[in-house]
Image: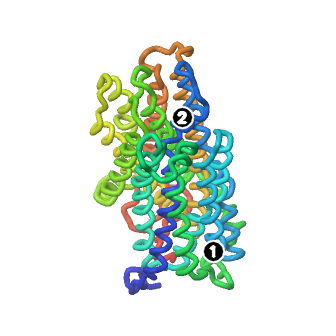
Amino acid sequence: MAELSERPMTPLPYQKIAVLVMVFLGDSLCMSVVLPFVPFMVKTYLGLPPDQDYLVGYYAGAVAGAYIAGQLCTAPLWGALSDRVGRRPVMLACLFLSAACLLAFGAAPDLRFALVARFAHGLCSGNVVVAKSMMADLTDETNEADAFVYVGATFGAGAMLGPLIGGALCEPATKYAGLPLMALWAERPYLLPCAVVAAVTLLDLAAAAVLLEESKPETPDAPADGVSDAAADAGVRELLRDPGSPFRAVCASFVLFGLCFMAFQEVFPVFGRAPVAEGGLGLDSTSVGVLQAAAGAATLAGVVAVYPPLARRVGVPGAYACALLTCAAAAYPAPPLLAYASAGDTPWLALAAANGAVSLATEVSFTSLNLMLKRSAPPNLVGAAIGAGSSLGMLGLAFGPVFGGSLFAASSDPAARLPPALAQGRLFFLAISLVALANAGLVANLPSWPAEPGAVWRRAGGGYAKVDANDAA
């Protein structure tokens, strides 16, 4: 069979790809816009007295985890539904429901309503799953890499813009004089940023309705490799039992990574809002949003410049281990150390650098994990292996906010009587640093990354033979 490199590249349908990129951007904004203000929302709705301020972490973790938990429940169902009734109607429905749920969250009259709205938003956020399926429908082996590179860049842009919108536009009645509808913003202080992002989502809906056609083939083709869904599931189970395959270890690493990533994402705004006297930074919501936006900018600027040469030099697992060690040794412990050393003066540049390092390491980690999942399976099981590994990783992503918020809150409670090095939430930062360090040790025990392009990644002497992906295509 001819090598893929000898085939001319199929031109990309740029108009349709642009609409899908807008959908990815809208989803990234929906996820990140709430991060800077959730701790302030919790504090406002619960009316906690100063001696119970540490409880914010528990409730903020629950709000953040509710969205991921909703996604975990329904992401496979939206994909299956799009296979049955078509991509376009499912995407349009999910975009509309996402906008409605985000508006409901912003207008929530109390914390219980906000939790339900955020969980419902997660349940309805199938538009990204369907958009990825449409992207796959619209591309082939010759142009899929060029198309999917927009996905990572778009989520990086959303990670930068979302916190800016959320931090700058929440509580507008106390920040900006002379705004229209001031009474509404005073009564619903977190509605404006959600309304802005909901408007973006509705624009995505209009663009998709006008410019996108159904991409799913009317008669689904049989898998090119002849593997049925049942056979693929059995193959993945066999990979998990196979001592020669690194697949099981990569899945476990995905769970640990997801746990730390989402825990840090949730806790940093809580830590940033906490009073200086209690070990925090004493920042307002706008400042928290700016710091998180700087992290998104680091992802956009660094992933293209840093990841490819790093992976070529040390291999994909080596690049992933570097990311984990950066977080464990520097980025995760940095916020409490900087807060302690600054004595009340916010170290803006150092905090932005720490957040940027976490964000860049996260992008390196996600890219590496997907590549490792792909190379740890034979070509006829690649899709099933990536899907199974990503689903397991979602468990870590879903549990991370609850774990992080609860540990931060418990170690911030004066009644816990922890040593000073662990009190005021510092136990949380130490814990995720140790988990990241243990994860790096797990990665260090993986087999050497194969030098040959397309070769299956295996432990020496184990199981099935190497197969070149180009020959198997």
**Foreground pick, 193 / 441:** 193
**Foreground pick, 43 / 95:** 43
Residue 325 coordinates in the image, percent (x, y): 37, 40
> Residue at coordinates 60% horizontally, 68% vertically from top-left?
130
Residue 195 coordinates in the image, percent (x, y): 53, 56
**Above or below: residue 438 compared with residue 234:** above
> Residue at coordinates 39% horizontally, 67% vertically from top-left?
453
Instruction: Identify residue type, mark 2.
Output: Gly
Residue 105 in sight here:
yes
Q: Secondary structure at mark 1?
A: helix
Residue 189 coordinates in the image, percent (x, y): 53, 44
Instruction: Identify residue type, mark 1.
Output: Arg
Q: Earlier in the sequence, mark 2 or mark 1?
A: 1
Q: Residues within 10 Å of mark 1 (few under 14, many from 20)?
A: many
Residue 411 coordinates in the image, percent (x, y): 52, 22
Left or right: where does residue 9 sit relative to residue 386? left
Q: Secondary structure at mark 2?
A: helix
Circle on res. 87: 1
- Which residue position holds label 2? 404
**Above or below: residue 397 compared with residue 51:** below
**Foreground pick, 143 / 17:** 17
> Residue at coordinates 43% horizontally, 36% vertically from top-left?
437
Circle on res. 470: none
Residue 365 in sight here:
no
> Residue at coordinates 57% horizontally, 43% vertically from top-left?
187
**Foreground pick, 45 / 368:** 45
State the colouring used for the structure image.
rainbow
Left or right: where does residue 426 sit relative to residue 48? left
Left or right: where does residue 185 sit relative to residue 320? right
Q: Residues within 10 Å of mark 2 (few under 14, many from 20)?
A: many
Instruction: Compute the Cα span from label 2 to label 1.
Output: 36 Å
